[in-house]
Amino acid sequence: MSLFFISLLIIASGGVLSPFFKHNFTTMKFIAVSTMIVGSIGGIIDSGSKLMSQSATINSCDYTASLTYLKSFTLSFQLDSLSAFFLVIIFAISLMASFYSFHYMDKPERSLGTAVNYLFFSLLVASMCLVVTASNMIAFMISWEMMSLSSFFLVIYNYKSKENRRAGYLYFIFSHVGAMFILSAFGVLYALTGDFDLSHSFASAVSPISNALANLSENQKVLIFILAFIGFGSKAGIFPFHVWLPHAHPAASSHISAVMSGVMIKTGIYGIIRIYSLLNFSSPVMGANQLIIGNSQFIGHIVIVAGVISGILGVVYALGQNDMKRLLAYSSMENIGIILIALGIGMIGVSSGNTAMVIIGFSGGFLHILNHSIFKSLLFMGAGVVLHKTGSRSIDALGGLIKNMRITGTTFLIGSLAISGLPPFNGFVSEFFIYMGGFKGVGMTAITVNDASVAGFAVNQFAMSRLTFGTTAFGIVSLAVIGGLALACFTKVVGVVFQGEPRTRAAEGVNEKGVAMLVPMVVFALLCLAIGVFPELPVLMSMNAISSLNISNIGTESGGASVIEITTKMIGMAGTISGAALLFISMILSVLLLRNFAYKNKPVTTSGTWGCGFTKPTVKMQYTGTSYAASIVEFFRPFAPIHEDHSPVKGRMAGRSHYQSHVNDIAELYMDRVTLKPVLFLFDKLHWIQHGDIHLYIGYILLAIVVAMFFV
Amino acid sequence: MIESLLLWVIGIITAPFFSAVILKVKAFFGGKKGPPIFINYYTLMKLLQKGSVYSTSTTFIFKLGPVISLGAALTALMFLPIFGHRPIFSFEGDIIFVLYLLGLGRFFTIAAAMDTASPFEGMGAAREAFFPIICEATMFMILILFYKLTGHLSLVNYFEGSHPVYLWDMAGTSMVFIVIALFIVLLTENSRVPVDDPATHLELTMIHEVMVLDHSGPDLAFIELGSFTKLFFYSTMISSLILPFQREGIFSPYSLLLGFLAIIVVYGCVGIMESIVARYKMDKVQKFILTSFALAFFATVITMEFIK
C-alpha cells in the first residue's frame, strides 16, 4: 500500500473519529486538524516527489491500484503527473484550511455540528483525491458523487438559515444535473467503445490508445467532449452553469469556501482536461496531408469563447456585489474563465500542430490553476477573519480594518494584487504565459501548400488560420479587460473594507486574535510573492503536469519546434520574469531609500483628511463600494442589469424612504424564465399520467414489459 | 549600456521640462506669458524641501503609494528605446510586463486615495479604475497588430530597428490610426484634457489631481515626478512612431536634436488639445476612449488584408 492511500486513510479516519469526541471540543478539533495535517503532508511528499521526478519529455505512470467488487465492476486508480499536480494543490490547500479552521471553528455549543463539519471536510478532501486519480468511469463517478455530496453537507452547515438551505438546494441540483451530463458523456463513450477505462488518458506504456478509441469519428468525439464540458463546467462554474457558486460559497464556513473555491471547482477543469486527453484530439489533424478540417478543430475556439464570457461576466458581477464572499465567488468564476482561455489556446495549438501554443497555453493554464488556488484561498480566509471578527460580510458596512488587523489587511492586499495579475506576484506570471501562448496563435500563419491537388486544403487552412487569429486576438484583448476589471474589483474590496474609516459600529474596535487563522494567510501571501519572483519551480511543475497528456508529443512530426526547445524557452521566460521582478523590487527599495533621505529632519505632522473646505465630515460621507463600482457596472448594463428599489417622493415634505439596489446575474434571471418555466409547463401537461389509480399503474408495468420484449 | 543608462537618466531629468511645454502652449493660446519653462523643477525642489502632513485616517499604504507609482514609472522607462537607442533592459514580452507594472502603479495610487476616507478621493479613484480598462484593451489590440507585423513582443523590436520606417513600411497608412489611438491612450493614462483636466478648480470634476489631494512634501514630489516620467514614456513611444530616427550615431547632436523636437511636437499636441477642446462630460469620456480601441481594431483589420 502506497503512501498516497495511507495519507487518505489518515485524513478520513480523523474525520470519522471526530464525532466520537464531541464532548471535548478542543480535543475533537485537535484530532481532526492534526490528522488532516499529517495526512496532507504525507500526500504532498508522495505526489510532489512523483511530479518532480518526471522530466518534461518522458512520461511515466506510477502505481495503480484496483479493486474488483463481486466480479462485476472494477474500481481502479492510477496516478500520473497530471493527477500528481492536482494532488499537490489539493493537499496543500486542505492542510492550510484545516490549520485555519482550528481557531475559526470556535463555537463549543455547536460541538456536534463542528464534528460533522470535520467529518465531511475530510471526506471531501479524500474524495477529491480519488477523483483526480480514478482511472475508470465507475471509480470516477463514485468519487465524484462523494465529493459533491460531502460538499453539499458542508454548504448547509448553517442549516438554520433559510438562505443557506436554498443555497444548498441550488448546489445539489446543479451538481447533479452536471453529473447527469458527465454520465451521459461516459455513456456515449461506453456505448461506442465498450470500455469503462479512462486509463488511456493516463500516460503509461501499459495501455496504449485502444483501437475502439482511435476509431471514434470526429463528430462522436466532439459530442462526447461537449457533454463532458457542460457537466464539468457546472462544477467549475462556467457561465451560465455558475449560478450555484455565488450562493454556496457565502453559505459555507470560510475555510470550506477556501477549499471549495481554491480546489474543488478545479476538479471540473481536471475533468475537462482528462476527457480531452482521453479523446486524443491530436491524432486526426496531424501533418499537412489532412484534407478535411474536422469539427474537432473548433473545440479550442469554443473553449476560448466560453472562457471569455465567464471571465468578463464573472468579474463584472463580482464588481457589483456587496457581500465579500459572494464577490470572491464571482471572482472564482472569472479565474475559471482565464484558465479556460489558456486551455483553449492549448487546444487550438493541438489542432493546428503548433507546439509552442500547446506547451505555453496548457502550462500557463495549469500555473493559473495553482496560483488561483493560492490567492483565492488566501482571500477567502481573509474574508473569513473579517466575518469572524465583525460579524458582517457586507462591504459597505465595514472600513478601516487594516489599522487593527494589520496581518489580515496586509495579506489580503497581497492576495488582491496577485489576483489582479500584477507583478511581482504570482498572478502575473501565469497571465504572462497565457498572453505569450495567445500571441503565438495571433502570429500563426497558414501552412502554404503549392500542390494544386490540395488547393481546397490550402483555402481551408487559410480560413482556419484567420479564425485562429480572430479567436486568440479576442482572447488576448478580453484577458486585458479582465485584468483591468479585476484591478477595479479588488481596489474596491481593499479600499472600502480595509482602508478609510469604519462605516458602522461592527467595524470598530476589532482585533485579530487566533494565531491559527493568521499563519496560513501569511504562508499564502509569501507564496504569492515567492512564485511571482522565482517562478521556475512552479513552471516546471506545470510543464511536468502536461507531459502526461496525449498531446505533448505533437509538433515533432509536423516539423515545428520540438517540445524540448519550447520547454527550455519556457524556463528561460520564467527566468526573465524573475529578473524583471527583482529589478522592480530593487527599484522600489532604492526609491524607498530616497524617500527616507528626503524625509530626514523634516517636520511630519498629522491632521484630519482635507474635506475640500467642509469642516464637519462624517464617516458616512465616504465613497461606498456600490458607488465605486457603479459606473463600471453601468458600462456593461445589458449583461448586468441593475435592479433598484426606492419609494417615490410624495408631497412637499419627504417622508421615510428606503433605497436598495443590486446587480442581477442574467444567468440566474433567465434560468427561471428560460429553463424552469418551460420544464414546469411541460410536466404540468404530463400531469394526467399520474392519476393515482393502482389498476392503471399495473397496466403501465404490463405495457412496459410488452414493449420491452420487442426491443430486447 | 552606458549610453542607454545615460539616456534613461536624461529622460527622467528632462521629463519635467517637457511637461512645462504643455503649459507654455496653453499660455500661448490664452494670450498669456505663462509660467517659466523650468517651473516644474522649481516645484519639485520646493516640495522636496518641505515636510509632510498625514491624515489621521491613513496607513502605510498611503506612504507606499507614491513610492510604487514612481518606481513603476522609472522601471517602465528602462525598457523603452529612447530616441531609437537600445534600452537598458529588454526581453521577449517586456511590453506586457511594462503595461502591468503601470497597472501596479495605478493600483497603489487608487489604494492611497482610498486610504484617506475622503469622498472626493474615492470618486476620483473610481474613475481612475474605470477609464484605463478600455485603454488596456486598446494597448493589447495595438500589440496584436505589432506582433503580427514584427513577430515580437518587445519594445526594442518596435522602436529600435535598423530600418528607419520600420512599422510604416509594413502597415502603411493604418499606422496613422495607431498613432491617434496611442495619443488617446496617452491623454487618458496621463489624465489630460479632454478626459481629465489637471488645472480645474473643482475637486468634484477631477480624476487624478483629486486623488493626490492629501499628499504633501516629498511624497507629492515623487508622485509628480512619476507622472512626468509616465507622460514622457508615452510621448517617446508616439514620437518614435511619427519620426523615423537616424540610426547611426545616436549621440550625434543632429539625431539628439531631432529626437527632442519630435517629443516636443507630441507634448505640443497635448497642449494644443488642451487649449482647443473642453473637458468632456464623464459619460462621454468612455466613448472617447473607446474610439481608440475602434481605431486600433480597424487598423489591424486593414493591415490583415495586406499581409497574407
Image (cartoon, rainbow, N blue to C red):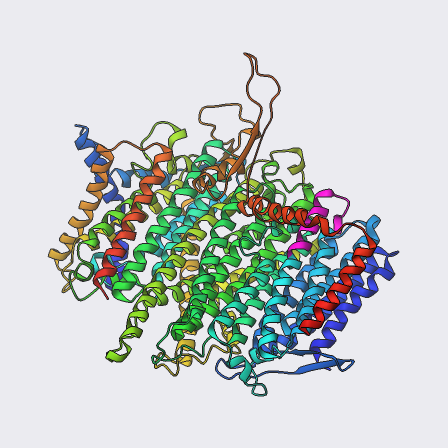
Would residue A499 appear left or right of A359 to someone viewing this image? Answer: right
Would residue B106 appear left or right of A383 to someone viewing this image? Answer: left
x and y, in percent, of residue A49 in the image: 61, 78
- Residue visible at 22% across and 33% down in the picture: B275
Q: Which residues are magenta?
A: A157-174
For the question of whether residue A544 can be seen, the reply is: yes
Nearer the observer, A115 or A64: A64
Asked if residue A345 is positioned above or below residue A280 in the image, the reply reads above
Nearer the observer, A621 or B217: A621
Is B58 a magenta residue? no
* Quadrant of res B197: top left
- Residue visible at 65% across and 70% down in the picture: A131
Is A161 a magenta residue? yes
x and y, in percent, of residue B72 in the image: 39, 53
For the question of whether residue A575 can be seen, the reply is: no
* Quadrant of res A634: top left
Would residue B26 appear left or right of A182 to someone viewing this image? Answer: left
x and y, in percent, of residue A210 in the image: 55, 84
Seen as rendered, the residue at the extreme left is: B254
- Residue visible at 44% across and 53% down in the picture: A483
Nearer the observer, A297 or A665: A297
Seen as rendered, the residue at the extreme top is: A652
x and y, in percent, of residue A413 in the image: 54, 50
Give the main secondary structure, helix, strand or loop, of the magenta stretch. helix
Image quarter where the C terminus of chain B lies is bottom left
